[in-house]
Image (cartoon, helix red, strand yellow):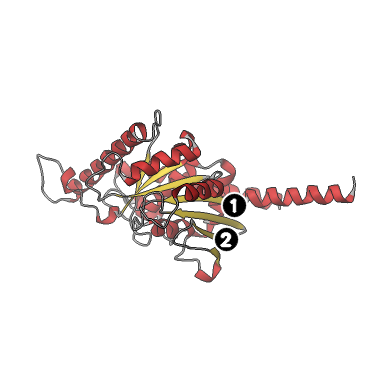
Amino acid sequence: MSDSLETKLDGATEVESEQQKRIKILITGKSGNSKSVIINGLAGKYMIEERRILECKPRSDKLQHYVWEERGIKLDVWSSPHLQDQDDRISIPEYLQELKEACSDVHLIIYCINMNLTRFLPGNPDARAMDNLTKLFGEQCWEKTIFALTFANVAAVDRFAPEDDESDTEENRRVAFQKGIEVWQKILTKVLIQEAKVTEPVVRVVPTGHYKKPALPDRASWLTDLFIECGSIMPDEIKDNFIEFNQSRFKDEELFSIEDIKGKKSHQQPIFVAWKNLKSKVKKFKKKKAITS
């Protein structure tokens, strides 16, 4: 084999290896819909100093692209507000082309929408954005999408309270909160079918709040639930990268507290089981890495 061919093959292997060590995520939603909170939660900004951000290119008229590196794994996050925002400075056709070129191979899409919205009318900016995403990436893009219901920590869900008992109890708040999530899931399903012309969409919904105070009325940690949903969507090799990137956060004394989850009521047991499985996968991954190294 010639040296030039060997060099080309080595180079191709290095590129492939680098691609395998990347996690690519698109986060979209109207400006002010708490995309930055989701980014901080995924990247673990509370423990990663800003000087460790390798790349940050926020521009008002462009996609915002962030890259973090942890344990040899790169997390690429594109933040896109302009699908929903109405801004005369933005050329929508050019923006959509940029979005398609940058994000056609993302592993995960997180669509942020404010849980406190009281009206979701046909043809509104989010409905148009969902239609544009479908046209850009095809119906299959919704198979790797999670809808993050932001500001769930301050959500006004009184309108979903049981009609026969409006007392302000912890149980009634929990029931009303879960009813609100169910209503949003139905609304988003309807919008995808009617506005974006998606057939039989699978709508994954996770309520989100602040990443440093992750408790919500019906769960100990929305961030735990978000991680579990992310893992359910990602291909196995990307899921391994995701776990490796966040490995130092999988500790009882860190944000994801197993004891907090154990302390929740029985309806939280499936989440606890899923979290145990995720921690088990971490151990298997470390063992596999030790054997191959």
Task: Estimate the x, y position of residue 122 in percent, counting from the top left.
Answer: 28, 38
Side of 235 relative to 7 (left or right): left
- How packed mark 2 is, by other alpha carbons closer than 10 Å (few <14, some 14-19, many 20 or more), is some
Mark in the foreground, 2 or 1? 1
Q: Residue furthest right?
A: 2
Q: Secondary structure at mark 1?
A: strand
Tell me which corner region of the image, top left, top right, bottom left or bottom right, holds residue 178.
top left
Side of 115 relative to 223 (left or right): left
Can you tell which mark lies on residue 70? 2
The residue at the point 60 percent across, 59 percent down is 71
The residue at the point 80 percent across, 49 percent down is 8
What kind of residue is marked 2? Glu
What is the total number of numbered labels drawn onto the structure image?
Answer: 2
- How packed mark 1 is, by other alpha carbons closer than 10 Å (few <14, some 14-19, many 20 or more), is many
Q: Nearer the viewer, residue 3 or 30?
A: 30
Task: Estimate the x, y position of residue 13 in percent, counting from the top left.
Answer: 74, 48
Q: Give the residue number, with chain letter if any, for mark 1.
A: 22
What kind of residue is marked 1? Arg
Are the residues tagged 2 and 1 within 8 Å (C-beta)? no
CA gap, disc 2 and disc 1: 11 Å
First-in-chain label (2 vs 1): 1
Q: Secondary structure at mark 2?
A: strand
